[in-house]
Structure formats: structure tokens, C-alpha cells
Image (tube, coloured by chain):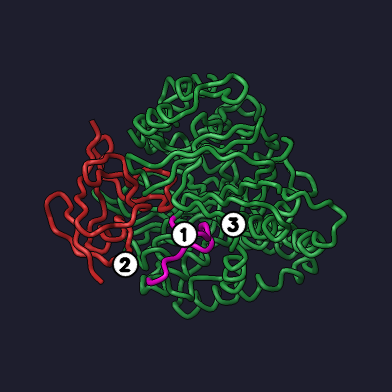
Amino acid sequence: MSISIRFDGDELQGRDGATIAGVLLANGQRTWRDAQGAERGIFCGIGICQDCILTVNGVEGVRACQRPACDGDVIERETSA
Amino acid sequence: MTRVIVIGAGPAGLAAAASASAAGADVVLVDEGERVGGQFWRHHPDFTDPRLQHQLGRFGTLRAALGSVRMLSSTSVWRVENFPLRVHVLTGPTDAANRQGETLEADAIVVATGAHDRVLPVPGWTLPGVTSAGAAQALAKRDALTLGERTVVAGAGPFLLPVAQSIAILGGEVAEVVEAASISTIVRGWGAKAWQLTAAAGKAGELGSYVASLAQHRTPYRFGSAVTRIHGSDAVEAVTVQRIDPQWRPIAGTERTVECDSVALGHGFTPRLETAIQFGCEISSTRFVTVDSQQQTSVAGVYAAGEITGIGGADAALAEGEIAGLAAAGIPGADLRYRSPLAARRRMRAFAARLDVHGIRPGWTAWLDDDTIVCRCESVRKASIDEYAGVSSRGMRLATRAGLGACQGRTCGRSVEDIVGACQPGQGSDSRPVFDNRPVLSSVRIGELAALSDLAAPPSPASTPTTVADTPTTDSAGGS
């Protein structure tokens, strides 16, 4: 089973049940956030470090490594102020 | 009927819930994850390669024993109280905006919150492609993924072995495994009183499978070495591997460059103490929860099991959890049901004592530059930590912002303490910053707190000593 999510406007295919980080990484997307000008990717993978947060369906601060991806999710990068 | 709440559904928590339930207690098991199992049995029913899982038989038995246990998965504990014993939780999709709040009450609590990777900072460690060793393992188990095509696995301790094996099983190349402890230290540590280890023979079989996997893939295993620099402009391109002395100081002139696109770093584990600290449990000088022979903490009715009482692996956690569950359910210490887990705990503690040879040595700070980021969330550099080394924990946080970011010092706290210690030799551990005292235990959105206060019963001083209004909001940074 395949699902489809939108990441910054691009449509990405992923396996049903994968985490959002899993879908992004499987599509070759290694970073989805920047902190003080530098790109950041997944780091702890278990919900501790919060380095992988992004915006899901308009809700900010969602940990990509912990949230299962759902068909139709709209994902956006977060940029540091 | 005794009401028991178990916090954490890894090996210790599952064993505690199962034994408390079997002893007749009314048990609620609370866990952040979507599925029980914790990090050790992290899995997805469709994706996880069974070769990455150990002791699945035991996992199945424990799950089957949870029949009458109330399971609260995808549930975060954000606050606890110790008199009366209360646990405040939010249930719903990870970091969603409208999770459901609930307050649970109990006669006894088992805290089994486990541990997470300790990762020592190294120049370049914020580059995309650098993860904790636990992340490499979690991605492999949960999503059947390796981060890159060619990975260096580096740090200290036996956990590097299953991480390397997982990457190899999923088709990734492990360029090298880099272990900080020297071969002579390991032989001395693991070889001493070897007869104590025969009782942990199951571990030998597991070890054998890792060694076979390394041999099969011809993976170099370097001892007495560390990754002291990670190179790359936008992402990882290579690492410097360097010999280190027994204090983990880099030895000049021994640098080698290893090309790779990923680095998995793990220098052991640090216990997740914040829930136990909020309950008021005594913490030892080695920074674990102090427990008695029945896993009871210094707080009446609060028990602790697993990695928060000492890093010992899943078998030790299972034994401790079983003991804690029985005790929390009110089973007297003379009962025969304690015999088997007590014996298992004794065996596994002998095994766990060997892990000391991989313990972090203070000389590691010598591989940092002034510019190396120590606190990832706030991009605080080593020079800033040095500059404020003499101030209090609070002063350090306010002046540098180290530990004030989204992770609240979970990633950098211990490293900041080490750096401060390196600057002030002779200073006692009591005066160092302590980052594990967190008034809010997990990220909570302000809107969720507001919704809880709308729903709350009229406050009565006796039953609600902590109101939402005086809850500090500093920990909500990641979620609001």
C-alpha cells in the first residue's frame, strides 16, 4: 500500500505506516529544517532531540520521527527566525 | 484492589505491568509510543526485519500477559504528583494540537522511563547525515531504512554492534566501527571474574551473531579510537578517525580520513530521570534512581526499574520490572515469586558492571574546538560554555541558552556538565549544572493546557496542589 503526502508543494509517495521521517528519507530528502542558517536532519530518531520537527497540516512542531505519515498530509519546512 | 500505574512500556515496564497484573493489581500502562516494546522492541508489524529483533518469545509472552491491563499508547506524561500519587497525561497523535487530557490516580507507580543515547559533541556533528546510534537502529527497526549508503558507526560500548549489524542487514555499508575503549581495557574489564558471565550466556550468543555479521561484511572494528571531526559542506562527506589515550584525549599524528555519507554516534546511554525527579525520588551520585532490593525508590509507593536505575540492558530491565511490579502490587518480599527475577537481576548486574570499561572519560572535551556547537537546539558553541563555566546551572542557561531549546538539555546537558568540569578541576559534582529537573515532562501546547484548565474540577487546595496556571511554560518551546 502506498500513500501520498505533499512536502513543500511536491508530491511524495511513501509506504503506508511509515513515519513522516521515513517517507522523507526514502524520497532522498535528508533535511527539512534549518537552525541558525545550517541545514538539520534527523538526529535522535526516538523523539528526544526535536531536531526533526516540521509543520503537519498547519500544526507546527511535530516530530517527523514519531508521527506516522497519513495519506494527504501536507508537510512544510520550518525555518528558524 | 491495588491500583498500579506503570510509566514506560519497554522491557522493564512491560515486565512490571505483567507481574503486577498477574498479582491481582488493577494496572494502567502508559507509553509515548504507538506500540508497546520501547526502544528494545521498537518495531512495525509490516516493516521490521525479524533479524533485528531479540527475545521475541519473551516479548510475545509479555504482550499476552497484558490482557486485563489498561493500555494507554501514544500517551505523554507531562506532570506527576507524589501525594497523592497522580499522573497527568495527554493522549493522541504525536505533537497534535488537541490531544485528550486525563489525570490518573494510583496506590503505587512503577517508573520505567528508560534511557536514550548519550552522544558526545564533535566538530561537524550538526551536519545532515549525523545521527545518534539509536536513531540508526530506530530507523532500521521502525522504517526499514538506513540513512546513507556508507556509514561510520562510532562511540563506545556493545550497542555499536547491533547498530552496525542492522545497517548491514538492510543493505547499507558500514565503513568502520570505531570504539573508544582500547582492546586491552576491554580484555581487562570483560575478562575479570569471567565465571560471573557464564550465567549471562544468552548474551554470548547474541555477541557471536554480531561478530559473525562484522566478519561476513569485512567491517573494520577500530579500538581505542574516536571520530574527532566530521567533514562536509552541506552534508557528511568524511570523518577524521583518530587514536585516543585512556582518558579519550586525541593523540596527535594518528588522524585518518574515512569517506562516508552518514555517521552514527553513541557513547553509551543516559537515563531519562525527569519523571523520577518530579516524583521526588532520590538520585545517586552516579545519577541513577536509588532503589532498594524491591526496586522501591525513596518515595513511598514509587518504584523504579530498568535503565533509570543503572544501565544494564534488556535482561536486567526485565528482571527489575518483574520485581517492581510484584512489589507495587503489594506482594510481600518473602513471596516465592521474587526468587527467579531476583536471581536474574543478580546475574545481569554482574554483566552490566562490565559496561564500565566503555564509560566516558573526561579527556573527550579535548576534541572540541571553541566553535563546536554543544547545544544543538540553540547553536551554543563550546567557547560560550567555557566563558560561563563558573556560574550556576540557571546562570549558565540564561547566559548562554544552552539547554533552553526545544529538547530542554536532553541532548547537551551532560556534555555541558563535562565541559564545565573540565574547566574547573576539583569542583564537586553537586555544584555542576543539573539539567534533568524539568517542571514539565514533555512538550505541551499552551492550547492543550488551557483546555485542561477549562475541564478541571473546581480547585481545592488539598487535591490540586499544582494548578495549570503556575505551570512553567519553558518546556513548551518545541510544541507551541
Percent position (x, y) of residue B389? 52, 24
Is residue B42 part of the magenta span, yes or no? yes
Instruction: Give the green chain's letter.
Output: B
Decide if residue B458 is on the left or right side of residue A66: right
Q: Colour of chain A?
A: red
Residue type pointed to by label 3: Val
Q: Is residue B402 visible to the viewer in this orientation of the structure?
A: no
Look at mark 2 in the image and give the residue it sits on.
B149
Look at mark 1 in the image and give the residue it sits on.
B35
Magenta-tinted stretch: B34-46
Q: Residue furthest bottom?
A: B216
**Which comes before the other along the chain, label 3 or label 1?**
1
Q: Quadrant of the C terminus of chain A?
A: top left
Residue B372 vs B178, above or below: the answer is: above
Is residue A2 part of the magenta span, yes or no? no
Residue B353 vs B376, above or below: the answer is: below
Structural distance between the alpha carbons of marks 1 and 2: 29 Å
Percent position (x, y) of residue B380? 38, 31
Look at mark 3 in the image and give the residue it sits on.
B69
Please tell me which residue is depicted at 21% across the width and 49% down the height of the picture.
Answer: A75
Given the image, what chain letter belongs to the residue carrying mark 1? B
2 or 3: mark nearer the eye: 3
Decide if residue B96 is on the left or right side of residue A11: right
Structural distance between the alpha carbons of marks 3 and 1: 14 Å
